Amino acid sequence: MRFNRNESKPAAQCSPSAGRTRRQFVRDVAAAGAAVLAVPNFARSRNPSAKLNVVVIGCGGRGASNMQEMLAENVVALCDVNEASLDKAAQKVPRARKFRDFRKLYDELKDSEFDAAVVSTTEHTHAFATLPALQRKKHVYCEKPLTHNVREARLITEAAKKAGVATQMGTQIHAGGNYRRVVELVQGDAIGPVSEVHVWVSRAWGWQSAAEAKSHHDIVAVTDRPQQKMKVPAGLDWDLWLGPAPERPFHEVYVPGPKWYRWWDFGGGTMSDLGSHWIDLPFWALKLDAPRAVEASGPPPHAELAPASMTATFEHGPRGDHLPAVKLRWYQGTAKPAAWTDGNIPRWDSGVLFVGAKGMLLADYGQHRLLPEKAFADFARPPKSIAESIGHHAEWLHACKTGAPTTCPFAYSGLLTEANHLGNLAYRAGKRVEWEPKTMRITNAPGAEHLLGREYRKGWKLG
């Protein structure tokens, strides 16, 4: 049985407290994958029709799209390291104050002057732009991935919990109807207990030869750090763009985005980027939390660059509600699951395959199929149990004003982000990683723990 885009149209586009385990924490989220937030009284008492005072940090690329969703509110401040992006955004909100450095924005704005922050910077500065807002109990919408590394993800998750504000990570596809229908099928036992999931994406961007980059339509071909120094484009503050990352000369292989995401100093490659979208579906449907162990494979790890193609296997233990242990396998670039290469399932460019005791469920962003189709020819799908989204951004804005839950709060998306970063960590370490989430220790390979975070450049600190 197949369900296509016309049948399931998308909507408009942590750390536990003392004595609680991460698994107990995750079990508290609502059926739609959202934690019911303890939003302060000032937010709960706000008139839903009242306008929020919003600061927008990162105005180009995704930032421009995210700002567009805020124009019905009061955008009171803009911040971007690129003068052209800042000026273009200011044309839409000419009364907003302009900043190049978000640290100055937070220093100069009083608590009474803003209610919420929208963060769309490069991912190596996400935590730095997000944490000050949370510490001041401001609502935050942050693009995916939530942070640059595991330690930052835990820090932001804990800060959000302490702040008790409305948070949302920018995984917009989570608001689509198709994902909801897939979650209903999996949680409704349509294919029985799920013991394995395969997630693959066709994008092959990252470390590879120039010929491979051309073949895979990569946006830049690079195999090592450039030795030559290029002139910084007019209007770009390169020092602020680098932020907490180690200093290096400007080169066009880093900007504009998303060229930078392949460099370990700035991003986590496809694993943390598209993993935020695609692994979100099994994370939600199977109520996953921290993996017990992760191992990965691919080309020999490069010191500077994330790979174009790689695989990772995440081992998750049994969860509440009698959910069995499950292995989630990730494939990117040229890597594909055996069922795909053997022709046993439709060869979609990217997809998620749930393997259950009674059958399989194949999904992508806009469609899904129960397999084998003959076995499910007379299947009667369960009634809808997950309400349609009012829109990913609208959901967050509504939560800011009313205290209603969001579906990708940092309590949920922080766990997802940590797991994806552990996939990269296992790849870079070149060994199986056995993870103890409560203590944040790699029990079998403590020598790999330096990859959980990093030291920051002088002038930059978190906390």
Image: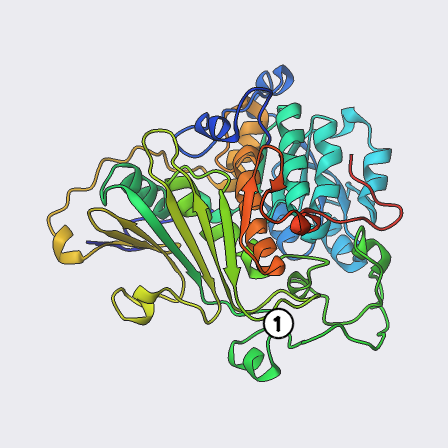
Q: Seen in the image, is 251 located left or right of residue 119?
A: right
Residue in the picture at 56% in, 26% down: 49
Residue 223 in sight from this viewpoint? yes
Q: Nearer the viewer, residue 120 or 201?
A: 201
The residue most toward the left is 378
The location of residue 369, given as percent across then percent down, is 25, 54
Q: Nearer the viewer, residue 117 or 199?
A: 199
Instruction: Name the quarter where the N terminus is drawn.
Output: bottom left
Q: Amino acid at mark 1?
A: Trp
The location of residue 370, given as percent across then percent down, is 23, 52
Q: Nearer the viewer, residue 229 or 82?
A: 229
Residue in the picture at 17% in, 57% down: 373
Query: As displayed, is residue 238 above or below residue 32?
Result: below
Q: Residues within 10 Å of mark 1 (few under 14, many from 20)?
A: many
The residue most toward the bottom is 211
Query: As displayed, is residue 340 above or below residue 387?
Result: below
Q: Seen in the image, is 382 located left or right of residue 413?
A: left
The location of residue 101, given as percent across then percent down, is 83, 47
Q: Seen in the image, is 123 located left or right of residue 181?
A: right
Instruction: Name the quarter where the C terminus is drawn.
Output: top right
The location of residue 384, given as percent across then percent down, is 28, 36
Residue in the picture at 81% in, 52% down: 243
Q: Nearer the viewer, residue 27 or 313?
A: 313
The answer to which quarter of the image holds residue 112 is top right
Q: Provide the secondary structure element on which disc 1 rests.
A: loop
Q: Give the total of numbered labels.
A: 1
What colour scheme has been applied to the protein in the rendered image? rainbow
Residue 52 in sight from this viewpoint? no
Query: As displayed, is residue 220 above or below residue 57?
Result: below
Reading the image, the residue beneath label 1 is 207
The residue most toward the right is 458
